[in-house]
Amino acid sequence: MVEPTPFARDGRPIPSLISAEEIAARVAELGRTITADYAEAGSDLELIGVLKGSIIFLADLCRQIALPIAIDFIGIASYGDQTQSSGVVQITSDLSRPIAGKHVIVVEDIIDTGLTAHYLLDNLATRHPASVKLCSLLHKPDRAERQVAIDYLGFTIPNKFVVGYGLDHAQRYRNLAYIGYLEEG
């Protein structure tokens, strides 16, 4: 297989933090775990992808879950085009159907401050699902301002601004196949 051309930012390559192969292996493990955990849920399992960052992770994860599932999306914003969260959470696009009585897994790209995830989990709980769990590809505990329970976690990472595999900086770099990081300067 031919390796894709490396991405560059201002003429500098974007260093890799987690390879595409490591991501694929961990997503497959998460899919097997979720399959085992929800084997008795029937057709009441719903994955809710948090737009836009989770879309690539969600697409790969759902294909690793050997159960009937429904998929929906919710848009949440707290970053804008910055590299730091504003702390203000905004729903930019709501779910397309009710989740009452469903077993819900919220699929996030990254949990860093925990503010967005905490807000979202509280919001979804008011909609009377059978259960709500959180699945995140990445967790950055050094940035935590609010603790949230991550039920299914891909990787714990250091305090770097990461891009790739759905994560962006000013809407760029989402299509990078690996998780890279932007260096200061």
Image (spheres, grey):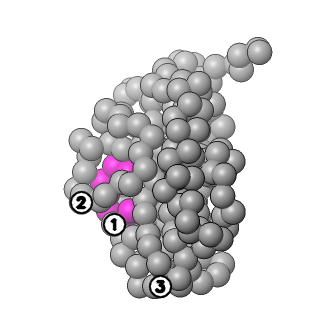
Of label 2 and label 1, which has the lower sequence position? 1
Asked which quadrant contains residue 139, the reply is top left
Q: Amino acid at mark 1?
A: His
Of residues 92 and 60, the one nearer the viewer is 60
Q: Please tell me whether residue 17 is drawn above or below residue 152 in the rendered image.
A: above
Q: Residue 39's x, y, as percent?
A: 57, 60
Task: Look at 65% across and 71% down and name the residue there.
Answer: 43
Q: Is residue 49 a member of the stretch shown in magenta?
A: no
Q: What's under tag 3, amino acid-wise? A: Arg
- Identity, as a three-letter code, of the amino acid under mark 2: Arg
Is residue 76 shown above or below 128?
above
Front tag of 3 and 2: 3
Q: Mark 2 = which residue?
A: 146
Task: Tell me if label 2 and label 1 are in contact, CB under 8 Å.
Answer: yes
Quadrant, the N terminus: top right
Query: Are the two marked residues, 3 and 1, in contact with CB atoms closer than 8 angstroms?
Result: no
Q: Which residue is mark 1?
A: 118
The image quadrant where one finds the C terminus is top left
Image x and y of residue 150, in percent = 36, 54
